[in-house]
Amino acid sequence: MSELISVQHSFFKSQKTKDIDYRLSLLKALKKEILAREQDILDAIHKDFKKSEFEAYLSEIGIVLSELNLAIKNLKKWAKPKRIKASLLTFPSKDYIYKEPYGTVLIIAPWNYPFLLAIEPLIMAIAAGNTVVLKPSELTVNTSKVITSIIEHVFPEDLAISIEGGVETSTELLAQKWDFIFFTGSTTVGKIVAKAAAKHLTPTILELGGKSPCIIDDSVNLKLVATRLVWGKLLNGGQTCIAPDYVIVKSNIKQDLIKALKAEIINRYSDNPKNSVDFPRIVNTKNTKRLAELIKDTTIVHGGEIDETTCYIAPTIIDEPNLECPIMQEEIFGPILPILVYDTPSDIEKIIWSLDKPLSLYVFSSNSSFIKETINKFSFGGGVINDLLIHFGNHRLPFGGVGASGIGEYHGKHGFEAFSNTKPIVKRGNWIDPSFRYAPYKQKVSLLKTVFKYFG
């Protein structure tokens, strides 16, 4: 492993990745290969999750291709040194910000969106001029194999490589010295990654998760809320880091909301979602059993059917679980939606502030003051008003968490900047050299204060 990293370090030092045209050629080759392997990717994702072609393209391939097109179109502009207004204190000078690659980057990808969350950071790491070692998830074997094959066809090993394997492989990779680490996964594993990075003072981006709340007041159109909530919660079988983890609804409309959610689930996935081609499966038996344990001893008002042999859990609604029970203490990551209630803002505070800062927060309301108060009061990575998940789809918005839900952000130009070190440069003129800053300093203090007062 260390030998592989040494080879990539050497290639990086050759300065070849600093060539923008070389980076562009790699990104174009990657795009061509993905387009050629589109059906292979769709088939692999279906084998891993039983995810429909529409949903796989929407949430994985489509976003990746959009990110590639964006990088190819804008890379030269992004990489160009940016002229910055100089300070009078450094007169005469021209000031710039340069974007330089970190070097050799480790990307550890998760299993829930195995193609998207492996390839999107890879695109931006390459665009920024880094070499990359990618570790795809061992839980999505079929997709990981396709990813490895694509990378082998596009990149030389000394520039980018995919290494498959389990926890032992990740542990060995984290024991190496990297120039940058990008990790997507759980908060628990994120802490392990952060500890390993700290040993070498390696900069990191940690895209984690948490319990993202969805707050609904009584000024809403419940049919529309139910439509959007069922889509946002059940996309990818609920295995989405920014999925609404639980609902906090005004108590006087709770029963109406539950009724609307039941009707919407049946409308979209039939009376028996197990037979729906549009409803994905849980990634494996272990996670299915974990979710089955979470709904034990809870009040199930819809769903609850489980088939461990096929990794199926029906869309399930839980009525007012205790805040201390397991389903309210850990991220659900499945098609299970607890419904909590509130009457006053302090009820909402009690729930949200009892948990770590979430990756996302959603508010459904027509009350502008309630919306403003809610998004200003709580700390979270990103959010949406009157819809779910869609902030992930705008490349102009940075994406990331805060506190236990993540460190750092990426997407679009923000992704390029995430994998780039910002290097300030001042080009000082030689045509004049005021003696003011040089010793002896006698009788210069009052003038110094004046300079800082007016020009600092």
Image (cartoon, helix red, strand yellow):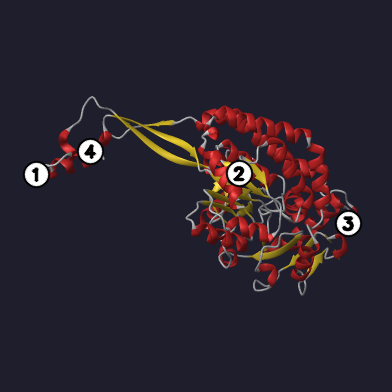
On the image, the x and y values in percent for residue 453 come to 22, 42
Along the polypeptide, which appears first: circle 3 or circle 1? Answer: 3
Label 2 with label 3: CB-CB less than 8 Å:
no
Q: In this rendering, is residue 69 above or below 388?
A: above
Along the polypeptide, which appears first: circle 2 or circle 1? Answer: 2
Along the polypeptide, which appears first: circle 2 or circle 4? Answer: 2
Identify the residue position indicated by label 3 in the image.
274
On the image, the x and y values in percent for residue 181 come to 56, 51
Judge from the rendering whether residue 89 lies leftward or rightward of residue 183; answer left or right: left
Question: Nearer the viewer's eye, disc 2 or disc 4?
Answer: 2
Q: For the residues marked 3 and 4, what is the alpha-carbon distance in whole angstroms?
A: 71 Å
Q: Nearer the viewer, residue 82 or 248?
A: 82
Identify the residue position indicated by label 1 in the image.
442
Identify the residue position indicated by label 2 in the image.
132
Q: Nearer the viewer, residue 370 or 147?
A: 147
Question: Nearer the viewer's eye, disc 2 or disc 3?
Answer: 2
Q: Tell me the kind of residue under disc 4.
A: Tyr
Identify the residue position indicated by label 4 in the image.
454
Q: Secondary structure at mark 3?
A: helix
Disc 2 packing (10 Å; few <14; some 14–19; many ≥20) = many
On the image, the x and y values in percent for residue 368 come to 57, 49
Along the polypeptide, which appears first: circle 2 or circle 3? Answer: 2
Q: For the residues marked 2 and 3, what is the alpha-carbon distance in whole angstroms?
A: 40 Å
Q: Tell me the kind of residue under disc 1.
A: Lys
Q: Secondary structure at mark 2?
A: strand
